[in-house]
Image (cartoon, rainbow, N blue to C red):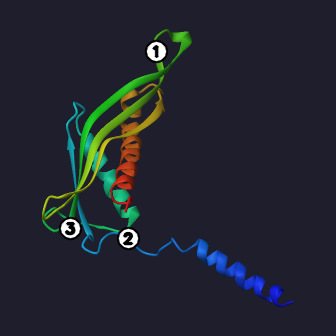
Amino acid sequence: MKLIKLLPFLALSLAFAGCSSYQLGSDLPDSIQTVALIVENKTDEPSIEVETMKSIRKEVQIDGRLVLRSEAEADVVLKVELTGYSLGALAYDSTRGSLAREYRVNMSGNAVLYDAETGDVLREVPNVTGNTDFAYDADLTAGKRTALLDAADDLARKVVSMTIAAW
């Protein structure tokens, strides 16, 4: 009889023990509260750093643990160097010869999170990629522009996940 009365307490104890590794709030060091963002374009594709910066800024804000600041005011700096950009055909229209009907945009780069005061590298993520596929609908330029936004978002999610959110 006593054992039956103790079963709910035992079950509750096991449930709390299973949640013991969870924590509320940020696990970033207390000295890291703000971040500055730098995106450099080392590719031949013009202006892709603009959309990539917007996407990374959005991801940092969604993560919510760090406040965006200028480089002079930030605790850490997240620098992303875009090193690759490509547009490649994925599928062709068999009725129209070599006309591509679906494309893929790939972006690649290197991310470094470093202490703004000392320059010490805290996290380094080489060769991070972002990509997306899109259908050719008659205007390749418009499709490419839209795909750039999606590829930049994909790259930004991975960069923030592997640097800031990795803590």
Q: Amino acid at mark 2?
A: Asp
Position of 90 relative to 98 (above/below): below
Q: Which of the marked residues, 1 or 2, is nearer the chain's N terminus? A: 2
Tag in front: 3 or 1: 3
Distance of label 2 from label 3 (alpha carbons): 15 Å
On residue 75, the disc is 3
Secondary structure at badge 1 equals: loop
In contact (CB < 8 Å): disc 3 and disc 1: no
Which is nearer the eye, 8 or 167?
8
Residue at the image point whose x is 17% and y is 58% from the top: 120
Q: Quadrant of the N terminus?
A: bottom right
Q: Which residue is mark 1?
A: 99
Which is nearer the eye, 28 or 72?
28
On residue 27, the disc is 2
Which is nearer the eye, 139 or 155?
155
Which is nearer the eye, 39 or 25?
25
Secondary structure at badge 2 equals: loop
